[in-house]
């Protein structure tokens, strides 16, 4: 079984032959193979490692393993989903490695991790990792491996201190959080002597972006070749981690990156995926569409990630239809123009209506819209506006099957809305939309409100959450399991409500303040203040624009 899975891979790179003294490395994805091999980030980092002759790389998934060394010096995880921490701890135990970094010795590998979850806020997982890589891997991975190579024979502590000097490499054990009270917010972070007080996320600024390094029928997206068209997003919606954490907006060169990658990928598959937070805002997107529309590629099946609503025209729709796609996905967030102004979503209801009309005219059979409940400043009538808009769209594009996927607002680190908690009314508002829309023949798909609560706990958590996560994995992944763990740990950390529901003042120290994002904190506060000018009843303190607001939690 295992051999057949790996035999099905079409590699688009040439792995190096490890030399005799190569560093043994395990590169893991904390989920099943079909999920991990569909992750473009995992694919690319694995290929970067496997092309080095000074490394001997094995791969590990929750269900499969390939070429695992008998004794590894480095073990890495690509982390894309918060709850995969459970699988990380399980895989460490499976490899007989202590799950806490403080319990490891020179006999154990250094455990490193990267990916969007850890780059945003690694603190809840800080006790489990020796090394966290913050940011883009293109420059960071070579710097990490080269530095480790230079201190390979040193003691574990000396290795970690040397790695801490590399921009973008965060060594949690060398930074200690200080709390004025066990139940209060973090006071500050104390760095060890000789390490930088601030760790700066690394940003790759080239115009050649990522493309698949392996294509396989065993992937969750069978036989897909993925190409990253853009990185980040120019829109900067106030809640959006995909935009704020990855700034600046970068585009792949059509001639130097996209076309060569597509030509390479289509030698092994007929399925192409164009990835990015805002693919259709690439300045050369029309040129790219013309290239894909050439007769030689009539057989290619094309998929595009969520697109900017006001870029959906008939040409795009017809291109998708002619290449085997029947649906399009657009993020609208809310039917309320005031809420869209609050979050900086530069979109009018007329733009959304025109998008679905164009989708229908171009031959698409369905459109999936993404919305959100509980956005800061949202009122009851704003949710009613979302329902009204969906019914309006149904009339405007008769025959087009409409789906509204809806989540609860989750605050994310390094965004202007990081200070806001979850709105407890969001659950009721999801139920309102469900009742209103399903009765009118619109497919409504809400994301679990309880999952949003768990996600918020992790996204806003500090290092005290680590003990909670360690305990909860034995109870299950329900919200009740987390509440049970909070009861057991009562007195050692703030309650769940502090992390999830409370609005934090902008003057409060944040768990990730020592990890420098793309924008300064003062800029995020300014963006927050801009958002609050559109709110009827802003809840957050610390804004001079709203002197009535409370300035404490």
Image (tube, grey):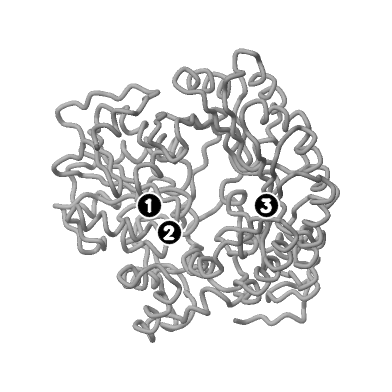
Q: Which residue is mark 3?
A: 403
Residue 180 at x, y percent in the picture: 44, 81
**Is the residue under label 2 in contact with that under label 1 (CB below 8 Å)?**
yes
Residue at far bottom of view = 491
Circle 2 or circle 3, nearest the eye: 3
Q: Is residue 160 above or below residue 532?
A: above
User: Callout 1: helix, strand or loop?
Assistant: strand
How far from the left and from the top, in percent, is residue 318?
73, 28
- Give the structural element (helix, strand or loop) at label 3: strand
Label 1 belongs to which residue?
Answer: 132
Q: Point out the image quarter for the N terminus.
A: top left
Provide residue 343's location: percent of width, then percent of height. Answer: 72, 59
Q: Is residue 205 left or right of residue 443?
A: left
Disc number lying in front (1 or 3)? 3
Residue 122, which numbered label? Answer: 2
Left or right: residue 253 versus residue 378 is left
Could you say which quadrant of the image residue 152 lies in? Answer: top left
Decide which of tag 2 and tag 3 comes sooner along the chain: 2
- Residue 82 location, x and y as percent? 44, 58
């Amino acid at each position: 079984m295992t051999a057949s899975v790996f035999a099905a891979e079409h590699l688009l790179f040439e792995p190096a032959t490890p030399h005799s003294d190569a560093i043994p490395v395990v590169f893991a994805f904390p989920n099943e193979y079909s999920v991990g091999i569909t992750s473009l980030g995992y694919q690319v980092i694995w290929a970067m490692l496997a092309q080095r002759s000074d490394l001997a790389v094995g791969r590990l998934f929750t269900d499969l393993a390939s070429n695992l060394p008998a004794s590894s010096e480095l073990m890495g995880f690509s982390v894309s989903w918060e709850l995969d921490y459970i699988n990380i701890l399980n895989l460490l135990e499976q490899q007989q490695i202590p799950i806490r970094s403080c319990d490891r010795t020179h006999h154990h590998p250094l455990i490193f991790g990267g990916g969007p979850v850890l780059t945003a806020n690694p603190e809840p997982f800080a006790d489990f990792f020796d090394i966290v890589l913050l940011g883009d891997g293109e420059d960071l991975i070579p710097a990490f491996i080269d530095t480790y190579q230079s201190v390979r024979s040193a003691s574990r502590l000396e290795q970690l201190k040397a790695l801490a000097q590399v921009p973008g490499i965060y060594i949690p054990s060398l930074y200690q959080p200080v709390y004025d009270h066990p139940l209060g917010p973090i006071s500050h972070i104390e760095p060890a002597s000789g390490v930088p007080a601030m760790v700066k996320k690394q940003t790759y600024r080239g115009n050649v972006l990522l493309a698949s390094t392996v294509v396989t029928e065993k992937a969750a997206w069978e036989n897909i070749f993925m190409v990253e068209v853009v990185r980040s997003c120019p829109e900067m919606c106030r809640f959006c981690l995909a935009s704020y954490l990855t700034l600046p907006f970068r585009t792949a060169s059509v001639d130097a990156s996209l076309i060569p990658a597509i030509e390479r990928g289509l030698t092994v598959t007929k399925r192409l995926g164009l990835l990015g937070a805002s693919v259709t805002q690439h300045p050369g997107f029309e040129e790219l569409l013309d290239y894909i529309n050439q007769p030689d590629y009539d057989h290619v099946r094309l998929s595009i990630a969520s697109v900017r609503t006001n870029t959906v025209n008939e040409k795009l729709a017809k291109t998708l239809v002619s290449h085997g796609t029947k649906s399009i996905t657009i993020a609208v967030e809310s039917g309320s123009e005031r809420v869209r102004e609050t979050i900086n979503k530069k979109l009018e209801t007329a733009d959304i209506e025109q998008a679905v009309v164009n989708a229908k005219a171009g031959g698409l059979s369905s459109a999936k819209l993404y919305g959100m409940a509980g956005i800061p400043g949202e009122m009851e009538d704003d949710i009613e506006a979302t329902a009204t808009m969906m019914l309006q769209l149904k009339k405007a594009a008769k025959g087009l099957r409409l789906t509204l996927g809806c989540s609860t607002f989750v605050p994310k680190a390094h965004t202007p809305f990081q200070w806001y908690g979850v709105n407890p009314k969001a659950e009721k508002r999801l139920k309102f939309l469900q009742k209103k829309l399903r009765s009118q023949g619109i497919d409504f798909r809400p994301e679990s409100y309880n999952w949003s609560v768990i996600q918020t706990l992790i996204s806003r958590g500090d290092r005290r959450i680590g003990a909670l996560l360690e305990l909860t994995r034995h109870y299950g992944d329900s919200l009740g399991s987390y509440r049970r763990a909070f009861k057991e740990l009562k007195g050692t950390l703030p309650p769940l409500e502090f992390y999830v529901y409370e609005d934090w003042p902008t003057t409060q120290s944040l768990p990730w303040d020592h990890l420098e994002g793309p924008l300064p904190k003062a800029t995020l506060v300014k963006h927050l203040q801009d958002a609050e000018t559109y709110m009827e009843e802003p809840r957050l303190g610390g804004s001079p624009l709203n002197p009535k607001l409370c300035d404490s939690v």
